Amino acid sequence: MEEKPPVFRAWTHWYWFVMGVLVLEIILFYWLSRSFT
Amino acid sequence: MNYIDWLVLFGTLLFIVLFGTLKTRGNQNIEGYLKGDNTLKWWMIGVSIMATQASAITFLSTPGQAIEDGMGFLQFYFGLPLAMVIISVAMVPIYYKLKVFTAYEYLESRFDLKTRTLAALLFLLLRGLSAGITLFAPSIVLSTILEWPVYVTTLLIGSLVIVYVVSGGTKAVSLTQRQQLTVIMSGMFLAGILAYAKLPQNISFFDTVNVAGELGKFNLINVLPAGVENPEKLSFWEKVSRISQDRYNIWSGLIASTFLFLSYFGTDQSQVSRYLGGRSITESRLGLLFNGLLKIPMQFIILFIGVLVYVFYLFYQPPVFHNQVLLNRALQTQRADSIRAIQIQYEHLYAEKRKAVDGLVSAIKQEDEQRKKVFREEVKNLQQEENGLRTKVRATIGEAMPGAKIQDRDYIFLNFVLSYLPHGIIGLILAVMFSAAMSSMASELNALASTTTVDIYKRSMRKEAIPSHYLKASRFFTILWALLAMVFAMLANFAENLIQFVNIIGSLFYGTILGIFLAAFFVKRVQGTAVFIGAIIAEIVVLYCYFFTGLAFLLYNIIGCVVVVLVAYILQVIFDNTTKEEAAPKV
């Protein structure tokens, strides 16, 4: 069976992970701003 | 400060310098000295990138920024993870493929020598100035706090850095940054915990956050223009116009900051050299992404420490002026009576504010919205009066001691540490400041030396010499740039807020440098001369914006970048058409 290209897949995942964390952080900070101001 | 603090401070600094020097001593070649033999693992790269960016200014200014303006400064960092991803995808592979020593080498293979030299010179100008400020900020603050002459602190930091950077080059920089970041993180973490522990017993963590939020310190995200009564009622263009003049909001954070960080991490040699020393392209990319993940939480913690200090000073009388040494000196002058009179007014005002704060806390605990609103407004009004008195005392100190640095924002955090934290921790926090200054300066000197050697000296002045000659030249340039930074730091006395000043200086040049690189990476049609002229025009436009318009400085990054790419493209089209016309046979 032919192996899938692991590096490419892993890299794509890493990029999405970093961007996803950023989006979650912005949502969290927005919520904090609204809740405590 | 007592002997425990001195022991912790000097013990930490000497250990780091000796470790860095001894571990990397011995004969090196130019490749090892400038690139570290490509042995760094991803986490070392990440640590090195973070330690380079976080200078002493970060730890001196940022808590003060949170105390005075709240946590909105955090938005400035939102573009960083985006920039990390873009650099990992588009820039790192090209640097690796071409096996460059500096980012500017790539520009010659893509464009021509003059564009490479222009970018290298812009970098040297920008980074040379920044290295001076990187050193100036902690030197001036620490000299005041420790009551040493400013040249002593400047020489101490500068000389310690010279010892290990000249001896071990890039390897020593990365190695010492690991210890420095450990000291920095543990010191700041401890300071945060102790600041919280110092709050009155009946104030829970939730109360702390609530009080800070009620008083406007939790303004983490600004979507609409700040300082406007009903921003929702503004028209779309009015909103855009006002937002473009706000320093920090989510839009400038996500868009303009991305440009700034793309330029800083993608084209600034002090950062590029951090990941060019990676074991492989994968390690370099992971190192960048590691920074992208950790930077925002780290800045959040530093700003939150500022908020904790702010809440602490709601329950304990803060000093009217946070630079205690300068205040004491001013009290020896003829203006002493005026200053004392303001201090007495300030103490009365604080007693009133304290009652309002207690009222606010009890309203928060009872969830009484009506009383919350009343006390919140009362505290805010009293705070405004306090600020008025603080401005007055600053002006009086300025009159008492002409030429003295009367801005005390950068002293708030250190003054708190010195006044309220236990011995040992004081020494550790001072070690944090020195370590942060040294870690940034080490990277900057290393990058300044490699760019001067590789892009200017080796390329345009002495083309064919043996490798050991260039190694000697690199060491010589490291010392030369360190001496220049030290002279600059000793002579300079400016800037109201240091971290902002560093970012403004960066924004003046980064847009243009990024424009050159973006044109190189993504606009295949443009050639050297068009980009060169575009870059010069862009720099003129950015300087015009700085001196003659009120635009927020983060926007200079976009303006500079867009002008380079646009002008270069238009010029290239004109050049191509002219060439075609000249080449066409005349009938």
Image (spheres, helix red, strand yellow):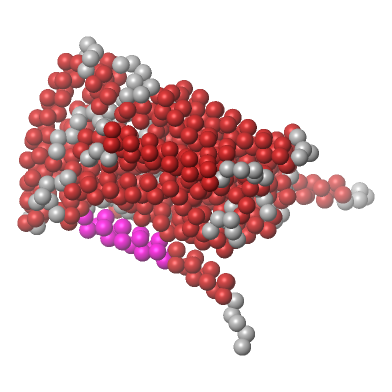
Q: Give the camera-side residue of B585 and B160.
A: B160
Residue shown at the point (87%, 49%) measured from the top left: B583
**Is residue B282 shown left or right of residue B456?**
left
At which x and y percent is residue B550? Answer: 43, 36
At which x and y percent is residue B13? Answer: 41, 38
Residue shown at the point (39%, 50%) measured from the top left: B182
At which x and y percent is residue B342? Answer: 16, 23
Residue shown at the point (21%, 55%) measured from the top left: A36
Q: Give the camera-side residue of B570 and B313.
A: B313
Q: Give the camera-side residue of B488 and B216.
A: B488
Task: Give residue B54's quadrant in the image.
Answer: top left
At which x and y percent is residue B385? Answer: 17, 32
**Is residue B568 shown left or right of residue B503?**
right
View extreme (top): residue: B334
Answer above or below: position of B401 versus B207: above
Please say whether residue B556 is visible from this viewpoint: no
Residue shown at the point (74%, 33%) measured from the top left: B461
Task: Give residue B113's quadrant in the image.
Answer: top right
Please say whether residue B207 is visible from this viewpoint: yes
View extreme (bottom): residue: A1
**Residue B238 located within the stretch drawn in magenta:** no
Range of magenta residues = A19-36
- What is the chief secondary structure element of the magenta stretch? helix
Quadrant of image for the N terminus of chain B:
top left
